[in-house]
Amino acid sequence: MFCGLRFSIGLAAVALATGCDSTVGLDSTRSTLSKLYVPGACAVDDRPDLSEVDVSILLLGDNNAGILPTDKIQRETKPVGELLGPNDFTWDKVADRTNFNGDEPAVVEGDSLDMPRGATLQSKSLQYRYNGGDERRNQARLVVYLLDSSGSLLGRDPRTDEVDTNKGSDADDQRLQFFRTLTNVLPSSTFVSMVTFNGELPNIDAGENSDGPAVPTKNRDVINTALADIARAERGGTPLARALRDTKSSIIDGNTDLNPVVVLFTDGVEDGDTSDDEDRSRLKAAIDSYAADGIPVIVLQLQPPVSSGLPRGRDPMLVELACKTGGEHLLLEQASEFTESRSPLGDIVRNRLVGSWVLRTATTLDGPAFGPGEYFLSTQLTVQLGGEAQPARLARNRDERLDYLDTRLWLSK
C-alpha cells in the first residue's frame, strides 16, 4: 500500500532558510507538515496516452489530520493554498533502485517491457479538489459504506456451500475492524449509511422505523451493530452494478442536502457480476451516473488469495469508477492491510473523504517504448512546505515481510 517518511530539519536551519520570525514557528495552534501520501494516479481524460496524469496527494499535519488550502502552518503567515505550487513538488529517482542506471526520476516496469525503463516526470499544476466540489464543501457530509459480503470473502464454495477459509480473501473479517475504527473517528457531524451486497441484490436495510443502517445517521452504534451482524455471514455472488445503482437511487438521491462520498469495498466479481451482463453495461451506466452527479467513489479492492483460483489484479472498471468520479482506487494485496499498524490505509481513507491535492504531471509514457498495458512506476516525490522537506518513497517495501505494502504508482493505457 502506501507509506510516507518523515524528514526533519533543524529549527535554526529552517529559520535561516525561510527568514520567518521565530515567534511564528512557536504558534502551537498551527500544524506542521508531517507526512506525504500518494494514494494513486489517473490518466487525464483527454490524454489516454499517459502524456499527462493527475497524481493524488495527501498532506498530513499534527494528529495525521489533512492539511487543506485554508489552513495555516508553522512558520508561515499565508494559508497553504497561497503557498503551494507545482514547483514545490519534485520527482527524484529512488535511491535503492540499483538495477537501473538511467537518470530519469521514474523506473518503469510492466508486462510489455523486456526490462525496466526510465521515464521523466514534470509537475505542471496543482489544485485541491474537494469531494463534491468547492461549492459543497461546507455541507454536512454523508459517508456511504457499500460493502461486498459475498462468499469469496469467507472462502465459501458457491456450488457446495462448503467453507475453506484458506481460500477466503478476508476469512477473519479484518475489513470489519477497519470500518468500525473508521466509523468511530469520523467527525460527529458526519452522517453514515451502510449497504451490503451479495447474492442477487444489495441489502438496503431501512429498519422498521427508519432506524436501519441504510438510513443516514450520526448514531455510530447503529453502524457498528450492522458491521457486527455481517461477520462470517458471507455467501453468494457479487451484484456490484445493482448495488451501486440502488444505493444511489434509494439513499443518495433522496438526501440532496448532504454531500455524499461512497467507500466501496469488494474483493472482485468472481466469475462475473450477478446483476450485470457480459459487457458490464449496467456498471458502465452506474459509473456515468455517479460521475455526472459528482459523487466520488473510494474503491478498496482486496486481492483474493492465489489458492482461491479467482481473478487477481486491478479490475479496470473499478479503476474507471474511481477515476471518473473523482475518487480513489486502492488495491489491497492482503486483508492484513486493514489492521497492520504500519499500513497508512486508515489515514488515507479518512482524509480522502474530504478531498485531495491533485498534481498534474507530464510524463514520457506516451513514447514508443510504452505500448498498451499496465505499468508500475518507482520514484520519489518530495514537497517543500513551511521549511520542511517531506518525501514519499513510491516503491516496494524494503522489508520483504511487508512487500504487500507496495507504494508504486500504477497506470494503464
Image (tube, rainbow, N blue to C red):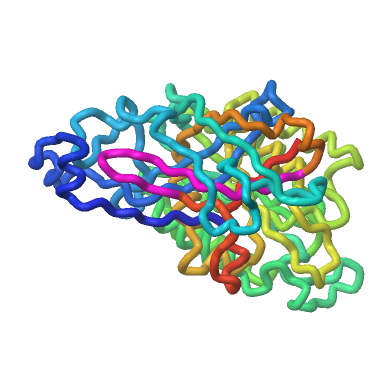
Q: Position of residue 5 (x, y in %)?
A: 41, 56
Q: Quadrant of the N terminus?
A: bottom right
Q: Residue at x 75, y 56 (%)?
A: 198
Q: Residue at x 59, y 56 (%)?
A: 97
User: Which sits in the foreground, 390 or 227?
Assistant: 390
- Boundaries of the magenta span: 374-391
Is residue 207 visible in the rendered structure shown here? no
Is residue 261 visible in the rendered structure shown here? yes
Up the image or down, 327 lies above or below 402; here it is above
Q: Position of residue 296 (x, y in %)?
A: 58, 35
Q: Quadrant of the C terminus?
A: top right
Q: Residue at x 46, y 50 (%)?
A: 392
Judged left or right of residue 67, residue 152 is right
Q: Position of residue 175 (x, y in %)?
A: 59, 63
Q: Residue at x 39, y 43 (%)?
A: 59
Up the image or down, 95 lies above or below 108; here it is below
